[in-house]
Every structure is written in C-alpha cells, then in structure tokens.
Image (cartoon, rainbow, N blue to C red):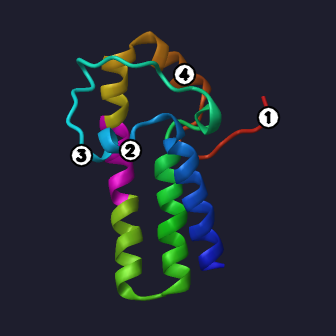
C-alpha cells in the first residue's frame, strides 16, 4: 500500500509539473514571478485542484510512512501537514498579486487539495 501511495503521488507530481519549468520552480534558473508574467495554468490536473504538487507530496509522504513506519517518516508527514496551510496561504496571496481577479475566480471554482469531479 505504501509503494502504491508513493507511486500515485509521483504520478500526480509529474502531471503537476507538465506546464511548469522544473528549473525555475527549483530555483536553479533565477526568476521573479512578479516581474516575469506568465499565464495562469488551469488545464490538465489544475482543472481539478489548485495545489496538485502538495497533494502529490501528501501521497508520497503517506506512502513512505506506510512502507517504513518509523518516527522519522511520521515526523516528515507531520511537518508537511503543519507546513501546508501556511504554504498554501502564502502561495495564494502571491498568485492573487500576480493574476488578480482571474486567480480569485479560479480559486472560487476549483478546490485546493481534494478534487471534485462532479459539478
């Protein structure tokens, strides 16, 4: 079960990065999000949830805990759970500053972490 959860998380991460530069995301290529405008990604997995990278990490860290149930893996998952509300809050403030009303409308229609497949 742990390997399956981690595998699902990895697939979600790969799908999430389809429309982003991994080099810019990781900071290897420096850039300023507030100056270098780009289009708001609302296609693919982002059509169903706003933060698929975080969902992928939840699956990976949960899978790690199931596969290797140690204090270390539990602490990793707890640290992620503590970080997520803070990280999502700051990220959404930045996205509203960049995209304005377009992101606000997207935010009101698309859930953060748990997808809704019916409307």
State the image quarter where residue 106 is shown: top right
Q: CA distance from mark 1 to mark 3?
A: 38 Å
- The residue that mark 3 highlights is 28
Vertical placement of residue 86 versus 21, above or below: below
Residue 30 colored in magenta in the image:
no
Q: Position of residue 20 (x, y in %)?
A: 44, 36
| Distance in Å between CA atoms under marks 2 and 1 | 31 Å
How far apart are labels 2 and 4 at the CA level? 23 Å
For the N terminus, which image quadrant? bottom right
Q: Nearer the viewer, residue 25 or 84?
A: 25
- Residue 74, percent from left and from top: 41, 78
In front of the other: 15 or 85: 15
Relative horizontal placement of residue 76, taking residue 67 as reference (left or right): left
Tell me which label, 2 or 1, sits earlier in the chain.
Answer: 2
Determine the secondary structure under disc 3: loop
Q: Which residue is mark 2?
A: 22
Q: In the rendered view, would you say 44 is above or below 69?
A: above
Contact between labelled residues 1 and 2, with CB atoms less than 8 Å apart: no
- Report the magenta residues as a range: 82-90
Sequence-first tag of 1 and 3: 3
Q: From the image, tell me which residue sits under label 1.
A: 118
Dominant SS in magenta: helix
Q: Which residue is mark 4?
A: 106
The mark that comes first in sequence, 2 or 4, is 2
């Amino acid at each position: 079960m742990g390997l399956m959860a981690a595998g699902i998380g990895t697939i979600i991460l790969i799908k999430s990065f389809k429309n982003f530069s991994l080099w810019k995301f990781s900071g290897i290529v420096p850039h300023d999000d507030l100056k270098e405008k780009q289009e708001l990604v609302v296609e693919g997995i982002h059509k169903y949830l706003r933060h698929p990278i975080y969902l992928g990490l939840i699956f990976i860290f949960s899978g790690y805990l199931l596969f290797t149930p140690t204090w270390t893996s539990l602490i990793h998952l707890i640290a992620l759970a503590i970080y997520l509300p803070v990280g999502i809050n700051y990220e959404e403030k930045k996205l509203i500053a960049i995209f304005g009303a377009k992101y606000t409308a997207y935010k009101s229609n698309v859930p953060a972490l748990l997808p809704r497949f019916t409307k």
